[in-house]
Amino acid sequence: MGGGTGERGVKSLIVLDNEAVQAMGSPAHPKHQRVLSLVQVVAQRKRRAAEVALAVPTTVRAQAGWDRTVAAWALANRLRVADEALGRAEANVAAQIRAATGVSVADAHLGAVLQGSKAQRVTVLTSDPGDVAAVAGSRAVTIVRI
Amino acid sequence: MGGLGLKLFSIPARPRPAGGLGVRGARHTSGQRGGVVGWVGVEGAKRCTTGQWYNQQMTKLTAIDEINRLLDDAGKETTNTSMRLPVALRDAAGIAVAQLGAAPSTTALASAALRTTLEAIVMQAALDAHYAEHPEARPSLADLALAAAELDDNPLAQTPELLHQAAEQVGRRHPDANADDVLLWAEALASVA
């Protein structure tokens, strides 16, 4: 699923970090059920017409090894997780975040997605709350530790 | 269906994996996977339903992938449909657009609602298919309640024991309860504690 979530103006955006992606994609991952419980709640709320969307920054997806053309990622591909691409504007913000914090490119891109989101509420599923807090800047973000 | 302007797609029958049914066939036990896989009597004989289950799962997965492909299709092509809507529903949508600014048009309102519903259906179908294959991955009602509390930044997320208790009580009387039902009951329990 590509295209991002920006054009649809969702009220609530839930962004996955590297380990959340890996846990979602692999039944063998120790946090698989944990991440699925969060995705399951999103599905139930969408069924009640809540404007909520799942997203992954494309560099995070690359870091996690999520290739949408590979059958091993079939479950993740089916769960309506939108790609948030690293375009010109996002790359500039990510470069600023990386220069200021020294985080990885993927985390800097995650920060750019958080800071640029038009959603009223932004949540991150992460195993590293400290990094997320560092890259979110002044953007209010709900951090869910997986 | 043709009157709806929908393009029908065919779901090809998937061949079974080479060498038979693989792992699923190897652990063939009546009553597994919610009773879907097992043996049924046919005119006095018994017939294995594992292949039938496999084909049903493959058909569902193919349908999920096709719906996802169509939802992701960014094409601007539209169609007039002869889909029949109740007049009152159409009029209510018109008022919501004109007077409440619910959407730029009734078409946009209907499309957004249909998209959201289809996304929810396809996500749940994908999860259900995964749970059928990996029953151990299915979260409990208490897991879901905790997840819902965390997503909402609800203080109840700090009281997992209370959520577990609430999930047990709600689930006992309401087998179809969801995470938000449990949160509501947990709030009630917390308020009288």
Image (tube, rainbow, N blue to C red):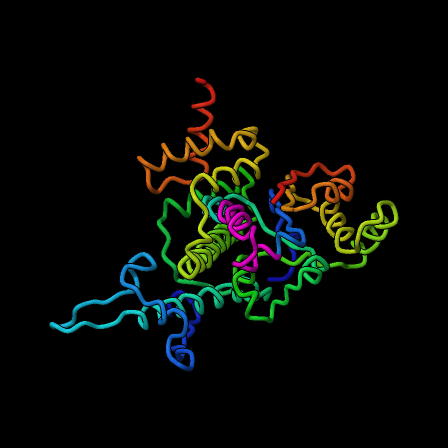
**Residue pictured at 42% horizontal, 82% vertical:** B18
Specify whether B57 is left or right of A113. left
Q: Quadrant of the C terminus of chain B?
A: top left
Q: Is residue A34 magenta?
A: yes
**Residue pictured at 78% horizontal, 41% vertical:** A134
Q: Position of residue A14 (x, y in %)?
A: 61, 47
Say if A60 sits above or below A135 in the image: below
**Residue pictured at 42% horizontal, 78% vertical:** B17
Q: Which residues are magenta?
A: A22-42
Q: Position of residue B61 (x, y in %)?
A: 44, 66
State which quadrant residue B10 falls in: bottom left
Residue at the limit of the structure toward the right, as seen here: A99
Residue at the limit of the structure toward the left, as seen here: B44
Name the one closer to the observer, A74 or B137.
B137
Say if A122 sits above or below B170 in the image: below
Specify whether A65 is left or right of A42. right
Residue at the limit of the structure toward the top, as seen here: B192
Say if A145 sits above or below A24 in the image: above
